[in-house]
Amino acid sequence: MALTGLPPDADTDIARVSQALAMITPRWNARILLALDGKPLRYKEIARKVSWLLNGQLHLKLKQLCDAGLVQRTEHTTRHVTYGHTDRAAALLPVLPLIVTWAEKNLETPERPLPAIEQIEDGLTLLTRRHAVALLWVLKVRGESSGRTLARMVMPDCDWTNVYPPLRQLVADGLVDTDGVGHPYRLSAAGDALGPVLGALSAWSAGQPLRQAVHHPVWGRPDAPPAAQRWVSNPARLPAPTAAPAPATTRTNPSPAWQHGGLFSHVTPARPTAALPAGGPRR
């Protein structure tokens, strides 16, 4: 069944990206995938890394990730079982720094520095709003569009006024702009900047190398591929300052300075209580 009024190949692309987001966005999924960095781990080893999860929660999450094809459960003996990334999960992980880079540039400035894992979770939350990916996609393809046109493209079988709640949410999130009631909608600068993220998710979900993202027919920018950046979400994000922190603003490295273990601290996560009013889309 078609998701949008775009050509079938674009519709299939949107469906794949939406499914990919649905696999990694549920709460704690990204943290568990990052906790599985390196060699396969036994259940107790994983539990120590995500100690805020109750035993039953972790069991359920691991099962869901196994069912999604992102985690492989290996039973060596009845008493020795390990969990590790599948090849698909390993190919997905490089998408996460792209989300961090986008979030640090485009989301509002929080009142405290955020670990990169929280930047990832905030970005994923915005992308998994109802109809968000489809609406962003259509606006990227068509440019400015009225609410009625967007409704016809994104939800052709529904009352066209149903498009307004998700549109208002995207405007509130800072991904879509409009000049007011009755005026057309368009991608904001932050919405358009999601191109590398959505292009990479498209490549991954189609089984292609992530480098193909720059050639994506909608989100790709082959003439000006995004420069690789070194990012540090929070200088104090590591559990202990055992080494000198990496420079926070260097932008010239050939690849992102990303290490799985540096993405979050293994302590009970804390969320910001408020954010500064300026600095980009809300979290």
Image: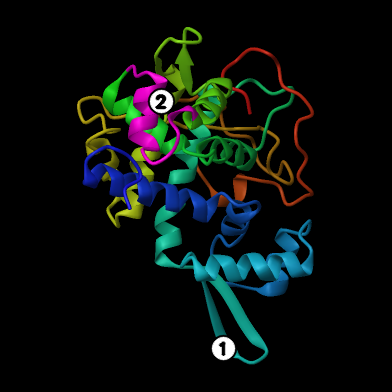
Q: Which residue bears the numbered disc 1?
A: 76
Q: Which residue bears the numbered disc 2?
A: 193
Label count reads 2
- Can residue 256 be seen from the camera position used here? no
- For image coordinates 68% across by 39% down, the residue present is 237
Tag of residue 132: none
How packed mark 1 is, by other alpha carbons closer than 10 Å (few <14, some 14-19, many 20 or more), is few
Secondary structure beneath dot 1 equals strand
Give how far across and how far down residue 23 sits, in percent: 51, 56
- For image coordinates 53% across by 53% down, the residue present is 24
In the image shown, does 17 or 168 lie closer to the viewer?
168
Quadrant into which the C terminus falls: top right
Q: Which quadrant of the figure has residue 124?
A: top right
Secondary structure beneath dot 2 equals loop
Q: Nearer the viewer, mark 2 or mark 1?
A: 2
Give the residues drawn in magenta, as a range.
144-161
Query: In the displayed structure, would residue 125 be above or below residue 207?
Result: above
Asked if residue 145 is among those painted magenta in the image, a careful observer would answer: yes
Query: In the displayed structure, would residue 274 be above or below residue 67?
Result: above
Residue type at tag 1: His
